[in-house]
Every structure is written in structure tokens, then in C-alpha cells.
Image (cartoon, grey):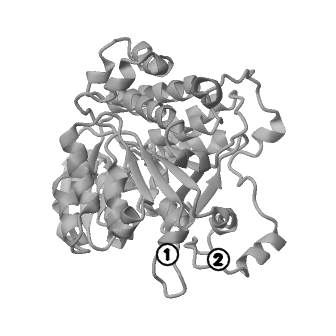
Amino acid sequence: MVNGQIWRRVVRTSSLRNNSELAQKGRKLNRFSGEERQELSSKRYDGRYIIDESNRGAWKLEMLNEYKPDDSIVLFSGKRRNFPGIGRRYLTSTDFQDITSIPKELYRSDNVYSQTDFRAQTFVNLAMNLCAYREFYSTDSRFSKLKIAIGFGIGELAALVVSNLITTEDAFAIASFLCDEVAASEKEMQTHAAICSVKNRHKVNLACHDARDYVAKTRGFTLEDALLIPEHEEYGVPTTVDVAAKIDRYNILIAGHPVGIQYIARQANKYNIQNVQVIPHYPALNTMHYQRSADKLSNLLSELEAGEPFLDVWNFANLNSKSKPFNLYQSVDLYSPKNLQYLLPKTLFSRQILWQNMINALVNYKNKEGKMDYTKTPTVIELGQGGSFGLSLRDIYGYELVKQDKYRWLDVGESEEYKKQHQQLLTRTGFSKFFSIRFYLVKRKQLDL
């Protein structure tokens, strides 16, 4: 059943889209009409967390309210990290050979699962996500009520595979293209990243803007009459310093030009940044530094014939207005064969990862008193390496989320010591809301990143 139903090969023929479809590039697909928007805005959402209705994505969140408490959400990890013995049970089983053999072919080495470089870990992460889904699909009863598949970064590729939008081979081909683009970009100009621990996030965007301004001045660019926004990277001005992901409530990942990252590290106190951990030679993915790569992938995906999904795969993103650089609005889209070409490249390359916003829209259900109602939240099943979202979910939604079995991590071969430590943190009571877990997430990054 697993081999036959989960990844059945769909005969697809490559076909170029006609001009009318190509003309839709850059437009918002599947919008509600004006009357439907007015009707939706007048509805009450039963306490369900929704995006501000003034934002574009609010009209599509009516669908999020249709999920039931006994539905399940599969959440794929985007972690790139080498764990000793990772995936050993998959590598020795013939049931997963069709998946585990692809990284060996693309990496051109049988030792790919023990390598620590970016390319190897990207392939391993995708393979572990898909193998874990196949293993637990037929053994865990909660998968029978699976309605939503979501992921972040490489995890989103896995979500698209299990939803039938793309094939396993398509996903690994896209991952290989991602690695090639990162290697070419880093060869041309290396970028850095930094993990910033903050109490108030609002000053981080200002810090990034000042860093871009500093880079422009030190590199001899003359942009006195224009605000330095991330989109300037599109015009060939390599000054990108921007937020790539919000790891949890207190930690933000920024990435971009090395000079800009160093500027923020030196001026941390000015922007109320408590701690800065610089990661040298880290690709500035999920920033505008890779906008050109996103455009290349979009052109390649125009020839892909996507399948019809049988699971909902959601995409959240912050978008910048070029005319008003500090005006951010949030976009929420449901993947479909029509918009795959436009959403996926930006998600992998140039859009900030907003995992907490997506989880909030799906899990954060509050009663009339404004308190979490765990009986009405869907179950979150995390697959892949590290279980990195578990501690953050425990930190945001409290111990009851774990106690009522609304979260579960299905490991892929991490050490017993790691799994024991992970479980102790999930189930331990008596945590100070603002200290204990936060302290652990900041000081022990091996469980969080």
C-alpha cells in the first residue's frame, strides 16, 4: 500500500504554458471577489487566530477555520544537521531504497549520509522527511485523518511531494538546483548570517536597513535619494542584509553581506539586541540576495506539469512594497498546480520563513476568555531531523499542548540520549515562561537549529 498509494508514479508530460497563463506572473491567483471579501470580513472566526483583515491573506483564511480538532497536520523539518547514525534503519531496508538511492546518485558518493557540507545535508534532510512519512503513514492512526502538510525550506519540498503536487524525482532535482545556485553565489560573493537574541523584534528591521546603508557607503554606491530596501539586490546592488527567519519568540536569523552583519554585531546595543552569534560563510537564503535564482527556478518550473493535490499545503510570506519600503503585508496562499511556479521559488530562495505565523493560523485556537482551547486544535505531527519545532511549540502554547497529545515528533534515528533530552524538555513542568526554555534555546542551539 505504501509503495502503491503514497508515491504512485503519475505519468506527466512536460508542456509549456500558453501566453495567457504566463501573463498572470506576478498577479495574485485565486483571489476572492469584492463581494466575497466583504462577506468574509463581516464574519466572526470563533476566536481562531487570523491575519489582520486589512492584509491580502485574510480572505483565504476562511478555509483554515474549516479544519476539525481531530484532523492532523504533518510538519516537515527544514534542519540541515548531521546526526550520527541518522536514517540507519532506512538505509538498510529495501522498502526505502527508491528514496535513499537518489541522494547517492546526485552527490556521486555512497557516503553522502555521513557528509556535513551544505549539498549533502540538503539531500539527506529531504530524504529523511520522505522516508519518515512513508514509514509512519501506515503505522500511526493519526495519519488517517491527515488534512494538511506544511514545511519550511526543504521541508516544504517534502510537503509538496506527499500532497502529490510534485514527484520525488522532481523534489530532488529542485534541491540539486538549489545547491548549485548556492555554490555559484557563494563563489561569487560569500555571505554571513547571525542569530540575534532580542526582546523586541521591531528594531531588527531598522538594524538591517542601517546595515544596508552602511554597506552601500563602504562599497561606494550612491543611493542618497532612495531608501535602501531589500529589493535593491534585484538591480545589481549587493547590499542585502535582511531577516531570513524568525526561529522562535526571542531569536531571529539575519543574513546577507558580511560587512552588514559585522555592523549589526558591533552596534547590537543600539538596536536592543542582547546577543549576536555570527555564522561565517552561511548562504543568505530566504533574502533578496537570491532573487535572481528564484527567477531562474520559476522559468524551469513553467515546464513542470504538477499533479492535483490531495492534501492542503499552505504558504505564508511577508512581502515588501517597493514604493513604501517599510510597508510590509502578509501573503497567505494555498498551493495549486497553477501557482506552484510562482510560490515555490520565492519560498526556497528569497522569502522570509514565517513558521510561527503559519502554525498560529492552524493551531492557535482561543476561547471567549482569550485562553487556549486545546480541545479544538488539530494534532501536529513533526517529521524529520531534530524535532526542532517541538520546544518552540511548547514554549509558545504551553505544556498542555504536549499533555493532551496535540504534538508528537517521529524521529529518524537520532541518538537515544538526544531523544531522551528532547522528551524531558517537552514534558518537564515548572518552567518559568520567560526564562527556562528560552535560556535553553539560546544556549543550547543544537536542539533548536
Q: Is residue 174 left or right of residue 435?
A: right
Residue 79, given in percent of the width and then of the height, sits at 35, 41
Quadrant including the N terminus: top right
Q: Which residue is mark 1?
A: 373
Q: Inspect the image, locate mark 1, and give the three-letter code of the amino acid beneath it.
A: Asp
Q: Is residue 74 above or below residue 305?
A: below
Q: Label 1: few (<14), some or many (≥20) within 10 Å?
A: some
Whether pointer 2 and pointer 1 mark residues with C-beta atoms closer than 8 Å, the reply is no
Residue 326, given in percent of the width and then of the height, sits at 48, 68
Q: Which residue is mark 2?
A: 45
How far apart are the two marked residues, 2 and 1, measured between alpha carbons? 14 Å
Q: At x 65% / y 41%, what residue is drawn?
A: 340
Q: Label 2: few (<14), some or many (≥20) within 10 Å?
A: some
Q: Inspect the image, locate mark 2, and give the three-letter code of the amino acid beneath it.
A: Tyr
Residue 39, given in percent of the width and then of the height, sits at 79, 76
Q: Name the element at disc 1.
A: loop
